Image: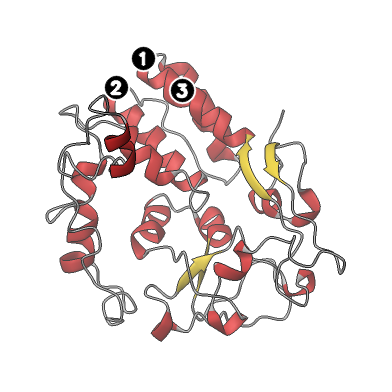
């Protein structure tokens, strides 16, 4: 397999099931079966676009792109209020309706171009589950954990060169592992991988990374409540500022087992701690 030359081309409808794709859910709208199109573009965009206003990226994610001067993936991942939508024709400025969207940002990867929309806003837009970039990231992560620095850096270089970024050839140890983790966050942003990653990744103390991100003193909670100066997230109080503050280490790492299943097991299944 091989990369497409341009990052934004990966998510174009005309390129689905292409050379970078490994597994996709197929969606095909028709007048005969109008509900078979993909509903996610509808749920995941601004109400000004006829959407439901769900799945809004944070300014923290935007800052992660900016920390790497990664304008290409930023623009093809996040649509921002008042700025043009890359790839769209005749859209001088995106209307995120900030009063209804906490961050005034939406995901670009799942966005349906106006020319592709149909009567009920369920376009023939596939859901990409696995693509070549993720395979390379899996390879890079495994190599970094095994201290195979050259292999990990080579995989990172392939990923980053496509979006005109350089790669530090001196990366090693924890610096290399963290670089791979950041690259995974940027490359796969808004594709449904992040939560699973922070659950499985461990910090320097061997604890799940999610424990230090959420909770009253978690980095994401502290960012939103005391650090962020984002003009939308700090003024739109229709949603709480401290999302994730109620996370309890050792409890919320796992879902509770349904009581019905615990009871039916006659003592064989024990409920997870804290429930």
Mark before the other along the chain sequence, 3 or 1 = 1
State which quadrant residue 212 falls in: top left
Q: Which mark is residue 264?
A: none
Q: Residues within 10 Å of mark 2 (few under 14, many from 20)?
A: few
Q: Is residue 267 visible?
A: yes
Verify CB contact (< 8 Å) between mark 3 and mark 1. Answer: no
Q: Residues within 10 Å of mark 3 (few under 14, many from 20)?
A: many
On the image, numbered disc 1 is attached to which residue? 147
Q: Give the residue at the far right of this rendering.
A: 32
On the image, numbered disc 2 is attached to which residue? 173
Left or right: residue 266 versus residue 25 is left
Residue 193 versus residue 147: which sits nearer the camera?
193
Verify CB contact (< 8 Å) between mark 1 and mark 2. Answer: yes
Residue 88 versus residue 42: which sits nearer the camera?
42
Q: Secondary structure at mark 2?
A: helix
Image x and y of residue 6, in percent? 68, 48
User: Which residue is painted at 60% across and 62% down in the image?
Assistant: 40
Q: Is residue 190 above or below residue 40?
A: above
Q: Residues within 10 Å of mark 1 (few under 14, many from 20)?
A: some
| Marks 2 and 3, how far apart at CA | 11 Å
State which quadrant residue 217 falls in: bottom left
Residue 195 versus residue 180: which sits nearer the camera?
195
Image x and y of residue 141, in percent? 43, 26
On the image, numbered disc 3 is attached to which residue? 152
Q: Is residue 177 above or below residue 4?
A: above
Q: Give the residue at the far left of this rendering.
A: 217
| Marks 3 and 1, how far apart at CA | 9 Å
Q: Secondary structure at mark 3?
A: helix
């Amino acid at each position: 397999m091989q990369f497409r030359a341009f990052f934004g081309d990966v998510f174009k409808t005309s390129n689905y099931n292409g050379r970078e794709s490994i597994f996709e859910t197929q969606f095909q709208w028709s007048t005969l079966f109008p509900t078979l199109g993909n509903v996610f573009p509808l749920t995941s965009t601004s109400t000004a676009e006829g959407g439901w206003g769900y799945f809004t990226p944070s300014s923290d994610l935007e800052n992660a792109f900016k920390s790497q001067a990664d304008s290409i993936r930023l623009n093809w991942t996040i649509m921002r209020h008042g700025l043009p939508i890359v790839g769209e024709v005749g859209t001088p400025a995106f209307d995120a309706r900030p009063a209804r969207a906490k961050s005034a940002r939406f995901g670009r990867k799942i966005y349906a171009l106006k020319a592709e929309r149909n009567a009920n806003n369920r376009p023939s837009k596939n859901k990409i589950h696995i693509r070549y970039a993720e395979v390379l990231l899996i390879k890079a992560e495994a190599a970094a954990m095994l201290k195979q620095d050259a292999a990990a850096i080579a995989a990172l270089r392939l990923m980053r060169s496509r979006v005109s970024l350089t790669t530090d050839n001196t990366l090693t140890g924890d610096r290399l592992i963290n670089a791979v983790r950041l690259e995974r966050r940027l490359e796969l942003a808004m594709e449904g991988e992040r939560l699973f990653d922070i659950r499985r990744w461990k910090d320097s103390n061997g604890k799940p990374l999610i424990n230090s991100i959420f909770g009253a003193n978690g980095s994401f909670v502290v960012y939103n409540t005391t650090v962020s100066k984002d003009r939308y997230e700090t003024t739109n109080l229709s949603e709480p500022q401290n999302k994730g503050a109620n996370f309890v280490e050792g409890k919320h790492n796992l879902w509770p087992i349904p009581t019905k299943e615990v009871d039916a097991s006659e003592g064989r299944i024990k409920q997870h701690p804290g429930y």
